[in-house]
Image: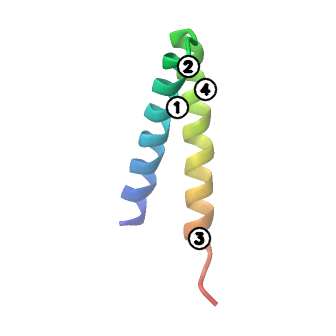
Amino acid sequence: MRPIMLIVIALLTKSLVTNLCMLLGMEAESAKSLGFGAMVIAALVVYSRSRRRPK
């Protein structure tokens, strides 16, 4: 279940950031690049949080 959630969160983040940037007037290629960066950051955050073990 965790890998699926990681993929879903990463893709949703990418689409949200890309669409938001394009709505604010950014060019398509720049918006896609920023969305990809946000996707990578979101994936790393979710992965690091899922790796923590409860005490």
Please state which amino acid type lies under the numbered disc 1: Val
SS at mark 3?
helix
Checking the image for residue 31, the label placed there is 2
Q: Are marks 3 and 2 in contact (CB under 8 Å)?
A: no
Q: Describe residue 22's horizontal placement relative to residue 55 as left or right.
A: left
From the top left corner, tell me how far across and down residue 6 is, in percent: 45, 55
Q: Which comes before the other along the chain, label 4 or label 1? A: 1
Q: Nearer the viewer, mark 3 or mark 2?
A: 2
The residue wearing badge 3 is: 51
Checking the image for residue 53, the label placed there is none
The residue wearing badge 4 is: 34
Q: Are marks 2 and 1 in contact (CB under 8 Å)?
A: yes
SS at mark 1?
helix
Work out how far the residue at label 4 is from the one at label 3, CA to CA, in angstroms: 26 Å
The residue wearing badge 1 is: 17
Q: Are marks 4 and 2 in contact (CB under 8 Å)?
A: yes
Q: Which comes before the other along the chain, label 3 or label 1? A: 1
SS at mark 2?
helix
Image quarter of the C terminus: bottom right
Image quarter of the N terminus: bottom left
Which colour scheme appears in the figure? Answer: rainbow
Residue at (55, 68) in percent of width and height: 50
Q: Which comes before the other along the chain, label 2 or label 1? A: 1
